[in-house]
Image: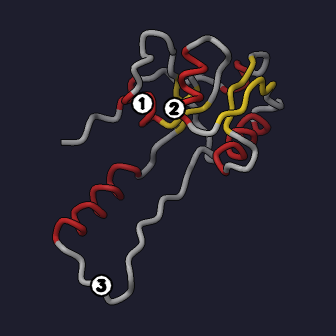
Amino acid sequence: MAPADISANFPIIDVASAKHLPFVMLKKHQKTRKIGEQICSDAGFTPNIIVEVQDFETANNFIALGMGVGFVPDIIARKSDSKNFVNYYQIKSNKATRTFVIAFKIGTVLSKASKNFIQFTIDKFRNKSYILA
């Protein structure tokens, strides 16, 4: 059974409330970095990025160490061992989306397990939001 969507339990905040804080962001070449910068821009500020990391788990760890704030998907918050050290909040932005793709060769007959996996993935990732930690 899939874990509950815990992001629904996080309070909603305005990203602009973090405009004076240091940010932990992903590296510039990553699409999710661009999304984070756009969310900040839409809120009227440019983030003060103090460290760039390769992945969300590393970002979450730096945030847990008190180095700054950053954006992580709710799945990171759900499985994080840092819940005692990180405050997670929901942000609302139409920019806070990612595209996932499931691909298979044309003409492939999918097994029942494959079809179930595809449906589970569609159901699980529909309408997820980013979290400001």
Bin the neighbour count of mark 3 within 10 Å (Cα to Cα): few under 14, some 14-19, many 20 and up: few
x and y percentages locating residue 121 in the rendered image: 34, 56
The residue sitting at 62% across, 40% down in the picture is 93
Mark nearest the camera among 1 and 2 is 2
x and y percentages locating residue 19 in the rendered image: 77, 21
Q: Secondary structure at mark 1?
A: helix
Question: Marks 3/1: CA distance?
Answer: 36 Å
Question: Marks 3/2: CA distance?
Answer: 35 Å
* Closer to the camera in the image, 93 or 69: 69
Instruction: Tell me the amino acid under the disc marked 3.
Output: Thr
Q: Disc 1 marks which residue?
A: 7
Furthest residue toward bottom: 107
Instruction: Tell me the amino acid under the disc marked 2.
Output: Glu
Q: Disc 3 marks which residue?
A: 108
The circle on residue 57 is 2
Q: Quadrant of residue 55?
A: top right
Instruction: Tell me the amino acid under the disc marked 1.
Output: Ser
Choose the circle earlier in sequence order: 3 or 1: 1
Where is 11 relative to 72, above or below?
Answer: above
Q: Secondary structure at mark 3?
A: loop
* Closer to the camera in the image, 13 or 84: 84
The circle on residue 86 is none
The residue sitting at 58% across, 36% down in the picture is 92
Where is 59 relative to 97, above or below?
Answer: above
Mark nearest the camera among 3 and 1 is 3
